[in-house]
Each structure stands twice: as C-alpha cells, then as structure tokens.
Image: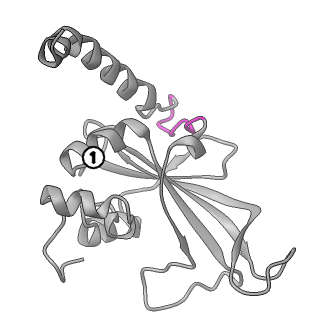
Amino acid sequence: MSRTRCLQLFAPLLLLLSAAANDVFAPRYTAAGELVLPAEYREWVYLSSGLDMSYTEAASKRGHSVFDNVFVDPAAWASFKQSGHWPDKTIFVMENRGAATHGSINKHGFYQTEDFMGLEFHVRDEARFPGGWGFFVSNGAEPAKLLPTAAPCYACHKANGAVDSTFTQFYPTAKPIAVKAGTFPAAGKR
C-alpha cells in the first residue's frame, strides 16, 4: 500500500486521536471558577528553568533563591511545533522550588531542593478570559485561584510576551520553532 493511501485511510483516526489528546489536557474548572490542578504535570513537556528571575529592576526580597520550572501540556506543544502559536486550551505550569548551593558533594553553583513553594498557571481559554489568557496560583494542594485582571502579570505578559503573550523568549526549545514559523518578533523586540 502506498504512503498516500495509508494517510488517506488513517487521517480520520489521527484527527480523532488528536482531538482526544486536546480534550485530555484541556483546562478544567471547579464550580467556583478555580483551575483543577492538572495531574502529572511534571510528565508534560519541560520548557525551561529559571533561577531567581525577576521582571523588574528590584531584586526579589525573598531572602532565598528560587528555581522556576516551566512545563506545557503535550497537546499544546504538538500544535505549537506545527504553527509557532500556542493554541486555545494551552496550559503552562510554573513550579517554584527552593535552591541550595552547598549539599552532598556540590561545592559551587545551585541545585533544586525538594522545598516546594507553589504553582503558577498561564491558561489560554479564549471563551473564558478577556484577552484570552488567565493566570492562576496554587499551593499545590488546592485548586488554583484565578488572579484578577488588575494583577501585574496580565499587563507584563501582554507587553513583553514574545509569542501569544507567553515568554517564549526564555524557552530554548520553543524559540527556534517560533522564529522559523515567523511568529517570533524581529530582533531587538524581545
């Protein structure tokens, strides 16, 4: 059987599987509008980690270092790889963990600790949120609470997000895809 004939025969099945994957990873909400924590998000597509990142000139006053690990749902990643855009129902998870410098055999640099400090979510749900995106926070044990649209993350992401109001400029595996697709801004913009 030719490759073309195989594709013709299996195209409906592939579309069905793709739709099922999108539904599996679609955001779910409580009756109160909180985001149900996605199960097994650490098995999603890992995009990047940052250490003590701050989007203002003032350094954090936390008194300790923090790693931010960013994951995206697999269905959104598959779509992004094809188009260079993050589709509706995309969920980004940013997991905040403590950082340490001396422990075990480590003498220099930082490593992540088991000190869990919370979760942040960036969710694209165009029917639910003005502007298409919502931001949520959680302690990891309870559903994530929606931040009000006056929270600074909305304006910051709109002004500085490289692709679809996301910080794709910090994701070393996603940025080249967006550049190739023509969805990443011209040099010097982000």
**Quadrant holding the C terminus:** bottom left
Q: Residue at x 16, y 70 (%)?
A: 185
Q: Type of residue at label 1?
A: Lys
Residue 45 point in image, percent of width and height: 47, 47
Between 183 and 154, the one lying in front of the other is 183
**Res 68 → quadrant:** bottom right
Residue 83 point in image, percent of width and height: 19, 46
Which region of the structure is painted magenta?
A: 31-39
Side of 21 relative to 176 (left or right): right
Relative height, residue 154 to residue 5 (above, below):
below
Q: Residue at x 51, y 34 (%)?
A: 32
Q: Residue at x 21, y 51 (%)?
A: 84
Between 39 and 138, the one lying in front of the other is 39
Instruction: Name the secondary structure under disc 1.
Output: helix
Number of labelled discs?
1
Residue furthest to the right in view is: 104
Relative height, residue 121 to residue 20 (above, below):
below
Residue 106 point in image, percent of width and height: 79, 79
Q: Residues within 10 Å of mark 1 (few under 14, many from 20)?
A: some
Magenta-drawn stretch contains 36: yes
Relative height, residue 30 to residue 70 (above, below):
above
**Res 19 → quadrant:** top left
Residue tagged 1: 81
Magenta part mainly helix, strand or loop? loop
Magenta-drawn stretch contains 157: no
Side of 181 relative to 144 (left or right): left
Q: How is the image coloured?
A: one colour
